[in-house]
Image (cartoon, rainbow, N blue to C red):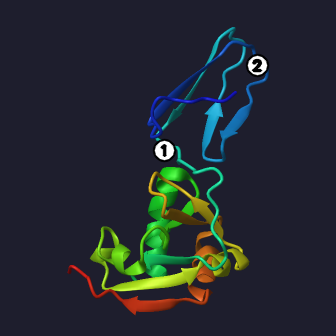
Amino acid sequence: MVVRPPHRDIGTLAVLLTCCVTPAPRYRLAGFAALELGSGLSVLVATITGMKLRLLRVGDHLDEDTVLVRGGELDPEVLKADARRYHEVYETYGISIFAVRGMTLDEMAQQVPLIRFRGLTLVTAGELIRSGLRLEPTGRNPRHYTVGFDDLGQGVKVLTDCRHQVMTNPYYDG
């Protein structure tokens, strides 16, 4: 069953099913939200609460040589805090990063959110993918991606061990 709500950010989602399910199964929607279905009902209502569903841009892939930029340096404690916040919302660990495409790095550095950072970290899509991290096209911004991983400590270590470069943001607005 495919559910297409009128909006993408869902705090509570009710799904009406016109069948009986015995025993009550547990389902995962796109790996991000669990549904508990009650049994013995001719119409079942499943509710997701406190979970935000991610918008994944299907078919949006990057070449290995595409440069990605993240605001700040790859400080393990900052990355862990960001990944924990992401996990609280989506139940998977992730770190935001932006693809340098459709505009230059110089243009991107002048805009929010990158202008808020003194330093910018650059890494290629291929480097992240070869390291075993997931690179997921998320959100409405066509440049936004999420570096995803399942284990917080290991994911942050793999990310910080990736070959990368840090540059000073000449447009830092601090």
Question: In the image, which disc is placed on residue 21?
Answer: 2
Quadrant occupied by the N terminus = top right
Q: Position of residue 52 (x, y in %)?
A: 48, 44
Q: Nearer the viewer, residue 69 or 23?
A: 69
Q: Position of residue 50 (x, y in %)?
A: 46, 40
Left or right: residue 22 versus residue 119 is: right
- Which secondary structure lies at badge 2? loop
Which residue is drawn at the image coordinates 62% and 75% (left, top)? 125
In terms of image quadrants, where is residue 9?
top left
What is the x, y in percent for residue 24? Answer: 73, 25
Residue 28 makes an appearance in the image:
yes
Q: Residue at x 67, y 78 (%)?
A: 126
The kind of residue on which mark 2 rests is Val
Q: Which residue is mark 1?
A: 52
The kind of secondary structure element at disc 1 is loop
**Residue ID at (52%, 58%):** 87
| 170 over 147 or under it: above or below | below
Going by the numbered disc 1, the residue's amino acid type is Lys
Check the image and name the residue furthest to the top. 42
Q: Quadrant of residue 167?
A: bottom left
**Mark 2 and mark 1: Cα distance apart in space:** 26 Å
The answer to which quarter of the image holds residue 65 is bottom right
Mark closer to the observer (2, 1)? 1
Q: Nearer the viewer, residue 24 or 96?
A: 96
State whether residue 75 is above or below residue 142: below
